[in-house]
Image: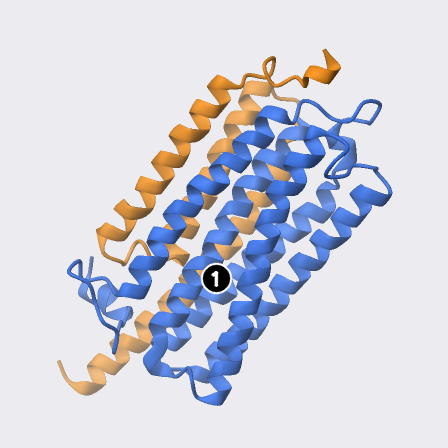
Amino acid sequence: MSHSAVASQDHGTEHSKFELFVQIAMLLAVITGIEIVTVYLPFSHTALVTILMLSSTVKFLFVIFIFMHLRWDKPFCTVLFFIGMVLAGFTMWALLQVFSAQASIPLSSL
Amino acid sequence: MSSVASGAIDHHHDSTTSTGISNKKLLMWIFLASDCMFFGCLISTHLIYRLHPPVGTPPASSIFSIELTSFSTFILLMSSLMMALAVNAIQKGNLKSMRASLVLTIICGLIFLGCQVFEFSEFVHVKHLTISNSILGTTFFTLTGTHGIHVLIGVIWLTTMLIYSYTGRLSEKDAIDVESMGLYWHFVDIVWIVIFTVVYLLEYI
């Protein structure tokens, strides 16, 4: 490939990445707006919690795979980060199971 | 992974580990993985104890200001965009563009911190929710305060990098330093994404 062709391709990649970042940021802002509106809609508690969890998961994944470059990085980075995520998830689940709402009532208020 | 995409991230002049990932980047990913557990514990503690506000105080939904928090969230998202553009710029060797993006990221970080200080001040002086008068206050201030400290550290780090770029201690060869800093900043953003949903929005349901 000629030098000018490589330079042109680099410029194209840079431009497309810039556009991608801006598009993702706008998408994240829109999802956040939808989340805020959603909490005022007359849906069931379960539906609202599900929608909010799904939307924040989507935002989370967009940031880690696009902004944090996991999409273009070596898979080991993804594995490493998700080990931490899974451990954190299990820790949270265990804490929530052990200390249910009833068990968390302060002794002074019983 | 396409060759074009992989070529876009240039780890020039940086020692790599046997994994092929640079030392600094690997260290940052390990740190972020451990920080996930740290924030996981703080978030679950808040979820467990959020049902116990101070006696006689109104529900959390009337204490929180969704407008202010939404604004803070938007600002932090925009700071993430600026940080991504800064990393992209330094990887392409464009120091001038990186400086401009870093300045905007710092401004966004400072606005976020200002909003948090205002929010905390409002909670303490107007809503009478303090770190010591209830379990809700303790878990809320500990969680959001820890996140705020992370943002503050990020702002100091960003400012240092910006100064270094002018003194010559940071050049196009040090793209990996900016990239590692970017990872930290984006992590602060994703933690806030979770906090915004779990701590703030859930209270309005």
* Residue with the most extreme front position: A108
In front of the other: B146 or B83: B146
Residue B165 is left or right of residue A82, and the answer is right
What residue is drawn where x is 43% and y is 65%? B181
Q: Amino acid at mark 1?
A: Val
Can residue B105 be seen in this snapshot?
A: no
What residue is drawn where x is 55% and y is 19%? A46
Residue with the mark numbered 1: A22
Residue A2 is left or right of residue A46, and the answer is left
Q: How is the image coloured?
A: by chain
The colour of chain B is blue
* Residue with the most extreme left position: A1
* Image position of B175 with respect to B182: above or below: below
* Image position of B121 with respect to B135: above or below: below
Residue A13: x %, y % from top left: 31, 70
What residue is drawn where x is 58% and y is 37%? B197
* Image position of B58 with respect to A17: above or below: above
The colour of chain A is orange
* Residue with the most extreme right position: B126
Residue A64: x %, y % from top left: 39, 51
> To which quarter of the image does residue B7 belong?
bottom left
Secondary structure at numbered mark 1 = helix
